[in-house]
């Protein structure tokens, strides 16, 4: 064994969450997301329409229930239907991405057990696929917004910031769930319930001001999703009486719990995925 | 070892924890957080060290559960080792359980591009090679068909072609490519030879010794997670087959009874040709003449041979039984020496075979002698991979109705 020979040998340490070169990571992530997107939207007859019909149906039903059946007082919100649709589309992204990501690593078993590649690509690709979908849905939402008579404002340009936060949060939750599911198969059921609860705990159906109670509002604003959704409403609908996230929480200081949860979730996801990634092929 | 190294493995350990009671739901974990988590540790690899030179074709053989597949998955970075060092020079492409990481819901085109990138090519590069891959696999017209509609033969062809075109420095192959038709097998063999000529390194994990002997420079035998032997393929092959038959005994066949307490002593056992010369191979269609020479250690009312013919995978192919000395068999006295020749038509497929020689007591019952793997021989010619044996056949066609004509 000569000196030259050993220098060309590289030590391999087995599978990991992100290892194997940044270029390859992003190539794979992009390829997987685009391939999956094409499969879903060009593979069925109605294609993309399916993914639009679902949030629209939910929107129609909820709009009817709250404005017609329950006579919910929506005067406080100038554009209640718009707020509802925007919220539903954003939440559908969160819910679909996380729900699909839970089983993603297990569904891709054939790939995981036979090839070496950064494992994190799998849940992230699921989230990315759903975000392509979100982008398309948002176009429809904005057409609806303009049709409802909301004037465009410069704060629309801030929407990508909110979506980015939502994307990061979704990615963190998805990654953590996907490796937990490898070990604990009831995670998918538990998560479906949690996601349902979160839908009602986030100001989508109702404006945060509905309660007219600072403590309740403050409690609701612990949820990072609530912060994001509230801020989106302010930026997009530009309603004078809609409080910003900070106002709803009763001061910027009260956004700290939400920020802590956001960062905590990201850190937990990174930690658990990193810990479990080398072993997923064995535990499948 | 000559030249530079392709792979260096040092003191590799890998064990799996097999829970006696698997907790696979959070609910269970919550309900009984303190439940003892019993598991037994299975040491799949227990201190493996070896080196493979660049350009070497290296075989890894071992019985099921010996750890060979675990070793391959460690080399391929699919599992992580508990301890030890693996160093690899260059790009490595794994071909595990007859496939690569294919997703059945995607088309061949999409799968090829994805896997090309997984194996280290750029997406552009993979797309450029797509046509060559599909051509080699002879799947041109099916390139946009989802893989779930592919036959297993088509899948293997696609995977193999992909691997060849990705052009890795080191190729890991688990199990033999005994799929696809004869023409494709020929293509595979040519591809292997080409790789050999190009100085690529290949690791072949298999339990088919013929393949190892045909292609490999060196081979390694693994048993119980340890290296039993590293050396020339023929020596490894012999040891592997011996190991296989110890295993057969453990798996239910009574253990060899050929020691001092055997009632009959075996003097010799061999396969001979028509002129009575000892041979190690028999052509398909010829006769297999199994000769044993025995010495009775006591008086017997009657004896019979009961040989079992076993193939290299340890599967019993057929039993050969006959009374010794004619029918009805005569009594045999202590000290009497006999040569018993059993002749069978060689209907066997090509491969390596073993004879477990046995002598049974006919009237008293019981086994007088049992020697596992007393003889081994190779069959060549005949059906290579279309069944274990070629049975004599007759086909008759009767026209039932001519109205169609």
Image (cartoon, coloured by chain):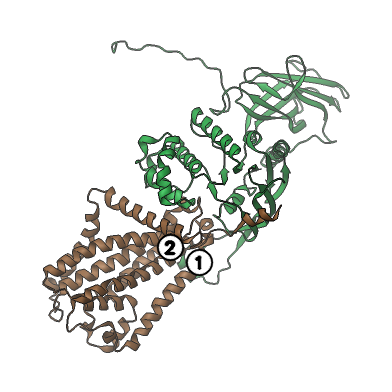
Query: Percent from the top left, x then y, of residue B214?
Result: 64, 33
Mark 2 burial class by Cα count in 10 Å: few <14, some 14-19, many 20+: many
Chain designation of label 2: A
In the image, residue B185 sits, relative to residue B86, either above or below, namely: above
Residue B29: x %, y % from top left: 49, 68
- The foreground one among B202 and A61 is B202
Q: Nearer the viewer, residue B280 or A200?
A: B280
Q: Chain of mark 1?
A: A
Question: Label 2's element?
Answer: helix
Q: Viewed as shown, does residue A34 lie left or right of B242?
A: left
On residue A274, the disc is: 1
Q: Horizontal and vertical percent for residue A78?
A: 13, 78
- In the image shown, does A215 or B174 lie closer to the viewer? B174
Q: Which residue is painted at 53% across and 27% down in the image?
A: B386
Classify residue A59 as left or right of residue B51.
left
Q: Which chain is green?
A: B
């Amino acid at each position: 064994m000569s000196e030259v020979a050993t220098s060309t040998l590289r030590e391999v340490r087995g599978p990991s969450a992100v290892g194997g070169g940044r270029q390859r990571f992003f190539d794979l992530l992009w390829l997987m997301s685009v391939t999956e997107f094409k499969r879903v939207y060009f593979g069925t007859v109605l294609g993309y329409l399916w993914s639009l019909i679902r949030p629209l149906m939910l929107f129609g039903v909820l709009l009817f229930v709250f404005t017609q059946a329950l006579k919910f007082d929506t005067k406080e919100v100038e554009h209640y239907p718009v707020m509802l649709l925007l919220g539903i589309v954003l939440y559908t992204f969160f819910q679909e991405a996380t729900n699909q990501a839970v089983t993603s690593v297990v569904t891709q078993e054939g790939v995981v057990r036979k090839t070496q590649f950064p494992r994190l690509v799998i849940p992230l690709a699921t989230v990315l696929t759903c975000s392509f979908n979100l982008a398309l849905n948002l176009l429809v939402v904005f057409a609806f917004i303009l049709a409802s008579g909301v004037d465009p404002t410069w704060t629309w340009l801030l929407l990508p910031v909110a979506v980015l936060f939502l994307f990061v949060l979704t990615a963190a939750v998805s990654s953590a769930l996907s490796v937990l599911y490898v070990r604990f198969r009831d995670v998918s059921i538990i998560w479906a319930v949690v996601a349902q609860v979160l839908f009602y705990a986030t100001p989508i159906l109702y404006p945060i001001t509905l309660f007219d109670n600072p403590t309740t509002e403050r409690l609701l604003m612990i949820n990072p999703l609530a912060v994001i959704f509230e801020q989106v409403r302010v930026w997009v609908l530009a309603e004078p009486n809609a409080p910003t996230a900070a106002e709803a929480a009763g001061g910027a200081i009260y956004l700290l719990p939400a920020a802590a949860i956001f960062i905590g979730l990201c850190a937990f996801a990174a930690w658990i995925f990193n810990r479990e990634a080398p072993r997923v092929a064995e535990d499948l | 070892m000559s030249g530079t190294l392709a792979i260096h493995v040092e003191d590799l350990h890998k064990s799996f924890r097999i829970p006696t009671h698997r907790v696979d739901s959070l609910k269970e974990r919550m309900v009984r957080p303190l439940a003892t988590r019993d598991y037994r540790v299975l040491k799949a690899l227990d201190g493996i060290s070896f080196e493979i030179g660049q350009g070497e074709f290296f075989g890894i053989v071992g019985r099921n559960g010996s750890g060979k597949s675990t070793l391959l998955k460690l080399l391929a970075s699919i599992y992580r080792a508990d301890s030890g060092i693996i160093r690899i020079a260059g790009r490595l492409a794994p071909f595990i359980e007859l496939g690569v990481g294919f997703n059945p819901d995607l088309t061949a085109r999409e799968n090829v591009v994805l896997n090309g990138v997984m194996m280290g090519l750029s997406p552009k590069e993979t797309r450029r090679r797509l046509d060559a891959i599909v051509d080699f696999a002879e799947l041109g017209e099916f390139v946009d068909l989802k893989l779930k509609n592919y036959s297993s033969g088509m899948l293997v062809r696609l995977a193999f072609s992909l691997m060849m075109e990705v052009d890795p420095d080191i190729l890991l192959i688990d199990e033999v490519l005994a799929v696809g038709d004869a023409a494709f097998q020929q293509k595979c063999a040519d591809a292997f030879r080409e790789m050999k000529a190009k100085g690529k390194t290949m690791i072949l994990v298999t339990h088919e010794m013929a393949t190892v002997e045909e292609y490999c420079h060196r081979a390694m035998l693994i048993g119980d997670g340890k290296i039993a032997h590293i050396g020339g393929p023929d020596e490894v092959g012999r040891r592997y087959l011996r190991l296989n038959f110890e295993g057969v005994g453990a798996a239910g066949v009574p253990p060899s009874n050929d020691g001092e307490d055997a009632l009959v002593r075996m003097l010799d056992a061999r396969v001979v040709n028509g002129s009575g010369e000892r041979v190690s191979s028999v052509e398909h269609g010829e006769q297999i003449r199994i000769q044993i020479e025995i010495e009775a250690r006591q008086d017997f009312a009657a004896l019979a041979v009961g040989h079992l013919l076993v193939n290299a995978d340890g599967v019993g192919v057929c039993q050969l039984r006959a009374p010794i000395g004619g029918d009805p068999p005569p009594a045999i006295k202590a000290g009497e020496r006999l040569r018993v020749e059993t002749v069978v038509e060689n209907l066997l497929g090509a491969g390596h075979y073993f004879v477990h020689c046995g002598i049974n007591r006919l009237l008293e019952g019981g086994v007088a002698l049992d020697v596992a793997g007393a003889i081994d021989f190779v069959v060549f010619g005949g059906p290579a991979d279309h069944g274990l044996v070629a049975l004599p056949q007759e086909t008759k066609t009767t026209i039932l109705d001519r109205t169609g004509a």
